[in-house]
Amino acid sequence: MKRRGFATVVWSACGALTLGGCYAREGEPVHAAQPDLGAPVQFTFGTIAGGELSSDTTRGRTTALLFVTTYDLLSQAQAQLLREVLSKHRPVANAAIVMMEPPHSAGLAQVWADAIGLKWPIAMASPTLMAGESQLGNIAGVPTLIVLDRSGRLIARSAGALGRDAIAECLTRADNR
């Protein structure tokens, strides 16, 4: 049996994920908020640059919050796809990464974002979020995409990877609220 190097195995796995359809196909459910949207959600996360990502700093624009980890290939692929969709989306929307990792992983989070060319704020999950007690709800897996309208109301929430059209539809739905 021929031995393959680690890089070959990783790239083969990436290819299998891509060819196997790691992104949600058209028609797959994205959990939308109820018609009565209620009050805007409140959240605050410290960014690895020393700033703040919060409900206050994101108001006024549609906002995509992507919850990921540095060690998950699907998280990386979803971040790259979200970046691509947002580059074409009008009006301009906010985007941010929330790392579902302990605070000591902040340095790795920056390297991860730099490696895939993300210029968005990168926040580390708060203990409240990690415990599932945030107004954003329980983040049970990564990647998870939450889209807020310009008033900060939850419009869409999806656990798992989405395709281009599904991401664009979530953003457009938020823009039209």
Image (tube, rainbow, N blue to C red):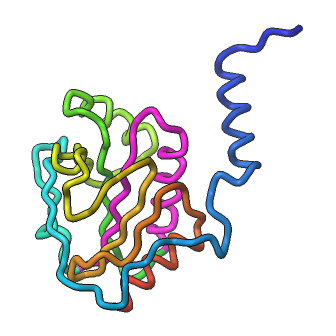
In the image, which residues are magenta? 61-88
> Relative to the observer, which residue lies in front, 103 or 120?
103
Q: Position of residue 1 (x, y in %)?
A: 89, 8
Q: Is residue 167 magenta?
A: no
Taking the view exactly as shown, the residue that stands out farthest to the right is 1
Q: Position of residue 55 (x, y in %)?
A: 16, 68
Q: Is residue 111 above or below residue 76?
A: above
Q: Is residue 120 above or below residue 13?
A: below
Which quadrant is home to the C terminus?
A: bottom left
Q: Position of residue 119 (x, y in %)?
A: 33, 52
> Relative to the observer, which residue lies in front, 63 or 120?
63
Q: Is residue 37 left or right of residue 167?
A: left
> Relative to the observer, which residue lies in front, 92 or 68?
68
Q: Is residue 82 magenta?
A: yes
Q: Is residue 156 above or below residue 12?
A: below
Q: Position of residue 72 (x, y in %)?
A: 49, 37
Residue drawn at point x = 24 percent, y = 45 percent: 130
